């Protein structure tokens, strides 16, 4: 092998090494970002729960995109933050909420993510009436905002209670 060819090979090796190192760092950064996103989404679910439990409808709504869609059980989908407010205002006005949420899974893919979990809730009337207790499961689609934060874009949930006979 000539000296010129050897010099060419030796000059390529550092470039290959740097390229490999760059790819490795990008993979590590990507993994770290996903972990940070999962942590942020878990915190978002915690805030969702805390705002419901404190009775703060406006703070709860701030966690939603403007075009958010809530899909409660046994009723049509509620489209848009203002319609979600109109649906939820009477519930916040009439009940003191005690809710727990357990996140079972979070998957992030770029600027979209989904989270899945289960909940238990107890709604105590502020005036007279019976306490309502339920538990169920939920699935939410989240969208990354321009500032890097996450918001709820779609939310569906339903009760674990068996259906009454004849409703199957």
Image (cartoon, helix red, strand yellow):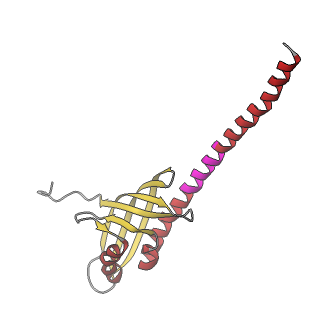
Q: Position of residue 76 (x, y in %)?
A: 23, 65
Q: Is residue 30 magenta?
A: yes
Residue at 82% of width from left, 29% of height from top? 11
Above or below 68: residue 107: above
Above or below 138: residue 127: below
Q: Position of residue 163 (x, y in %)?
A: 20, 58
The foreground one among 23 and 36 is: 23
Q: Position of residue 6 (x, y in %)?
A: 84, 20
Residue at 47% of width from left, 54% of height from top? 112
* Quadrant position of residue 115: bottom left
Is any atom of residue 55 visible in this view?
A: no
The foreground one among 94 and 124 is: 94
Side of 163 relative to 63 (left or right): left
Residue at 70% of width from left, 41% of height from top? 22
Q: Residue furthest top?
A: 1
| Magenta segment main secondary structure | helix
The foreground one among 140 and 98 is: 140
Side of 51 relative to 1 (left or right): left
Is any atom of residue 68 visible in this view?
A: yes
Q: Which residues are magenta?
A: 27-38
Side of 142 relative to 8 (left or right): left
Q: Position of residue 54 (x, y in %)?
A: 45, 78
Side of 68 relative to 78 (left or right): right
Q: Residue furthest left?
A: 166
The quarter of the image holding the N terminus is top right
């Amino acid at each position: 092998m000539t000296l010129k060819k050897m010099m060419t090979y030796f000059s390529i090796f550092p470039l290959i090494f740097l390229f490999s190192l760059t790819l490795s760092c990008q993979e590590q950064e990507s993994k770290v970002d996903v972990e940070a996103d999962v942590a942020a989404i878990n915190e978002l679910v915690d805030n969702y729960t805390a705002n419901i439990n404190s009775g703060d409808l406006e703070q709860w709504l701030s966690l939603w995109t403007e075009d958010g869609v809530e899909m409660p059980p046994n009723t049509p989908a509620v489209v848009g933050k203002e319609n979600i407010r109109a649906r939820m205002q009477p519930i916040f006005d009439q009940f003191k909420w005690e809710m727990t949420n357990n996140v079972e899974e979070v998957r992030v893919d770029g600027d979209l993510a989904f989270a899945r979990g289960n909940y238990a809730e107890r709604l105590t009337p502020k005036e007279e009436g019976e306490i309502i207790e339920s538990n169920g499961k939920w699935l939410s689609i989240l969208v990354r905002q321009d500032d890097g934060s996450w918001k709820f874009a779609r939310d569906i949930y339903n009760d674990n209670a068996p259906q009454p006979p004849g409703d199957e």
